[in-house]
Amino acid sequence: MSATIGPGPRHAATDLVAFAQALLVRAGLRDDCARDVATILVDGDLMGHTTHGLAQLAGYLGELERGAMRKDGAPEVVASRPGAQTWDGRRLPGPWLTLRALDAATEMAGNCGTGTVVIRRSHHIACLAAYLKRATDRGLMMLLACSDPAGASVAPFGGVSPVFTPNPIAAGIPTHGDPILLDISASYTTNGLTQRLYKAGAKLPHPWVQDASGRPTDDPAVLFHDPKGTLLPLGGIEAGHKGFALALLIEALTAGLTGFGRADPPEGWGATVFVQVLDPQAFGGRDAFLRQTQWLADACHAATPRPDAGRVRLPGERGLALMRMQSADGVLLHASILPALLPWAQKLGVPVPAALGNA
């Protein structure tokens, strides 16, 4: 497939990781945590997820400054069995916690065929797609989901009152070639995108939100003016029962399994996380698994496309192509990201990386 990055200044991914890591360290975060957080954020931008990459960094720095994100320590293991663990994340950085959970789940999968870690009281975990290839590169399948019990912006199907967060769920599926990388949410759109478009005075591509009276609209402003509207569940007015059901499932996997969620007093911006790794060798066998997944990939690519579609593209295909291109040619950041980080760079005495030049 082909992927393009538009005109504008680009930055070397390694420079962006070093920049983000230096900001986090100057803000008091332990160096290994800072490196992991910076890497996950930049990986999000490399894959084109520009609302959940370095766009999150200014918010993380603010949370560190306020003491709302813990700077040091380790998670508490609340429960442990050979194939399952529950952690209290103690408000530690979400990307660092999720990577440690992935390591633990991978080790359990090696022994038991599958390993699951659920984390309560994590901080925000950024872009879910950024974690998946770490599992699929080892021939493993990964499931990842999260919710934020402190937030509510998505209405249940048939309602106008906010109950859920967008509740993303992701999966990494190995094939003989590139992995299939799913990263979707139970809502039509995300808080990050609606906030960005509202600040820019722009509209959504489609009516993905509803006003306080339940009228669908493409105007994100309805989310920010009283009486406030809500994000629509995936499927919208016509078929939102599907996104509603998915949101309930993700709440059960995260809040339900960790025993901490919306029934508890909110503690601030964060995440409740579900991490699961499956080793195909422990089930039907790795070769048999890959035979099936590669057949599906080939069949989807061979499917006759709609006249306006060009070709059928698998989930994650564009993101991986962008990652390769931007790793080689430089990362094109959204125009809002560096201006938001400039005050922090000045405050913490960290130089902003120079651009590689205009594309």
Image (cartoon, helix red, strand yellow):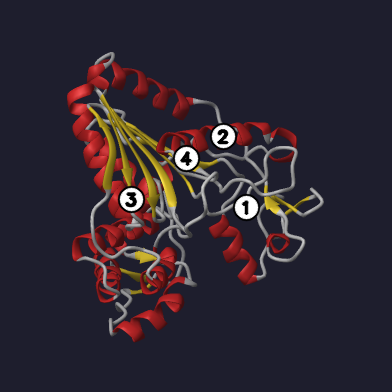
N-terminal-most mark, 1 or 3:
3
Question: Total number of numbered labels?
Answer: 4
User: Is 10 left or right of 223, judged from the image as shown?
Assistant: left
N-terminal-most mark, 2 or 1:
1
- Horizontal and vertical percent position of residue 206: 69, 50
N-terminal-most mark, 3 or 4:
3
Q: CA distance from mark 1 to mark 3?
A: 24 Å
N-terminal-most mark, 4 or 1:
1
User: Is 101 left or right of 221, judged from the image as shown?
Assistant: left
- Horizontal and vertical percent position of residue 284: 28, 13
Determine which residue is flagged by label 4: 255
Determine which residue is flagged by label 3: 89
Quadrant in the picture for residue 186: top right
Q: CA distance from mark 4 to mark 2?
A: 10 Å
Q: CA distance from mark 2 to mark 1?
A: 14 Å
The residue closer to the viewer here, 154 or 354, is: 154
Q: Residue at x 45, y 76 (%)?
A: 340
Residues at discs 2 and 3 in contact (Cβ within 8 Å): no
Q: Secondary structure at mark 4?
A: helix
Determine which residue is flagged by label 2: 248
